[in-house]
Image: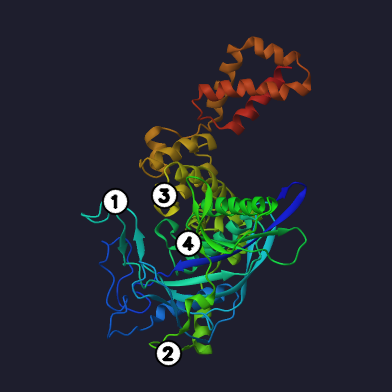
Amino acid sequence: MRRHDVEWEVVIGLEVHVQLATQSKIFSGASTAFGAEPNTQACAIDLAMPGTLPVPNEEAFRYAVMFGLAMNAEIGKRSVFERKNYFYPDLPKGYQTTQLEQPIVGAGQIEIHLEDGSSKTVRLHHAHLEEDAGKSLHEAVFDSGHGMSGIDLNRAGTPLIEIVSEPDMRSAAEAVAYLKKIHSIVTYLGISDGDMSQGSLRCDANVSVRLKGEEELGTRAEIKNLNSFRFIEKAIKVEAQRQIDLIEDGGKVVQETRLYDADKNETRSMRSKEVANDYRYFPCPDLLPVVLSDEYIEQIRAELPELPDAKCARFESEYGLSAYDADQLTQERATADYFEQVATKSGEPKLAANWVMGELAALLNREDKSIVDSPVPAEHLASLIARIKDNTISSKIAKQVFEAMANGEGDADTVIEAKGLKQVTDTGAIEKLVDDVLAANGAQVENYRSADPDKRPKMMGFFVGQIMKASKGQANPQMINEILQQKLNALL
């Protein structure tokens, strides 16, 4: 970033909170299902009522180890829970059970891919297990609470992994690419649904600036609770510019926690930033250290699914896709699975990639749907591509068939038959169409005969258009061009 002929560098580290997809909470048997009535899924253990004891959820540890292995990270064979003490209305215990000194996942790394085709490695500092807090609702959630805030504790105790990066990112675009890669990995692993709209994945961004070339880090501000890729990008950009403006105007950045206001596109101060000592961490007296054996870790490693980078490489080698197409198709597991079904059933991987990234993506975007809710099943798209391949329909007609399939009118064969859309491939029928068009457009034929040879190919487009119009778009374009060329050459 440049201002007043001085080049600034933005330094970004992210703390990503991922809700784990366990059926019960990290220390109790209460349900983690989303969408229940407020305060119906918080039990006495989640609230640390007297006489209760937490019991660790083994599935949460398994999921955390899966994530660590996917990140090529060190696995903490001995991890310890601490109490992080602070007061907030949605934390009735007065502390959060988390990990600090001995987390479940240690140092690792992740490779991100940017839109300009470049790649970058971002280091992972660690990832630790902890419990989620409740949620403050600043709207009328109770019959008598109009205009008041309420506390929903259903989320309290839901297992989280907090993924802490090193300050290795230098732009909002890199931060978004990093977060998308995290999202991709946790959803591929099946350890989280990654639904940012429901809070399953959210992010705090630590942002600072320094002059280009400096080694020392600037004072950072932490932007809390960013829950969409677009907001993360905008919040980082506006915060970096705020800090640059502040320094250049003679001010000083203070370490603090800030919130991003999407309506005003600005960050505002929330509270001065605490340090670890403010939280008075100490080992949780109710939970013993958790020790993992080598056999346990290796068993989990053996059960890992194919991950995005490996799938991307396989799509390039097995299906002959470009690096760009393979990367786009493997960012989400559901999209990769859909594409692979279409490619396998149709036998045309390149066409399958074009349709999934083209017409299907446009349809889903238009209807605001994810690919798992696609109105066109993978087998239907595969049958459509197969009909293009065997010349039953043209690519142009295929788009009409696709729209009909999207409207629930059946598979490709059903739509083609019902609408009479089969491509005309009969040589005699196409010859008659060509003859009729040439006879009806004598002046254009004479112009073609008298034109310079290098201009004739472009002039053919007029005749092709008329023939396609006469056939209602159903004549085979390749046959039209061949027969038309023969007949026009015979007139020269």
Q: Mark 3, mark 1: which one is toward the viewer?
A: 1
Residue 401, x across and y down, in percent:
44, 38
Say above or below: 345 vs 77: above
* Label 1 residue SS: loop
* Quarter location, residue 81: bottom left
Q: CA distance from mark 3 to mark 1?
A: 39 Å
150 left or right of 58 in image = left
Give how far apart the Cα atoms at labels 3 and 4 are.
26 Å
- Mark 3: few/some/many CA within 10 Å (<14, 14-19, 20+): some
Which residue in the protein does label 4 denote? 202
Nearer to us: label 1 or label 2: 1
Residue labelled with disc 3: 374
Residue 288 image label? 2
Residue displayed at 60% across by 28% down: 480
Instruction: Residue 220: name its quadrant.
Output: bottom right
Q: Quadrant of the C terminus?
A: top right
Q: Which mark is residue 280?
A: none
In the foreground, 127 or 318: 127
Q: Tell me the number on the disc at residue 147.
A: 1
Q: CA distance from mark 2 to mark 3?
A: 47 Å
**x then y, percent, for residue 110:** 62, 68
**Picture coordinates of residue 228 (x, y %)?**
49, 54
Identify which amino acid the numbered label 3 is placed on: Ser
Residue type indicated by callout 1: Gly
Question: Given contact means CB atoms under 8 Å apart, are the residues at marks 4 and 2 in contact?
Answer: no
Measured in 3D between alpha carbons, the distance from the residue under mark 1 to the one under mark 2, in whole angstroms, is 44 Å
Nearer the viewer's eye, disc 3 or disc 4?
Answer: 4
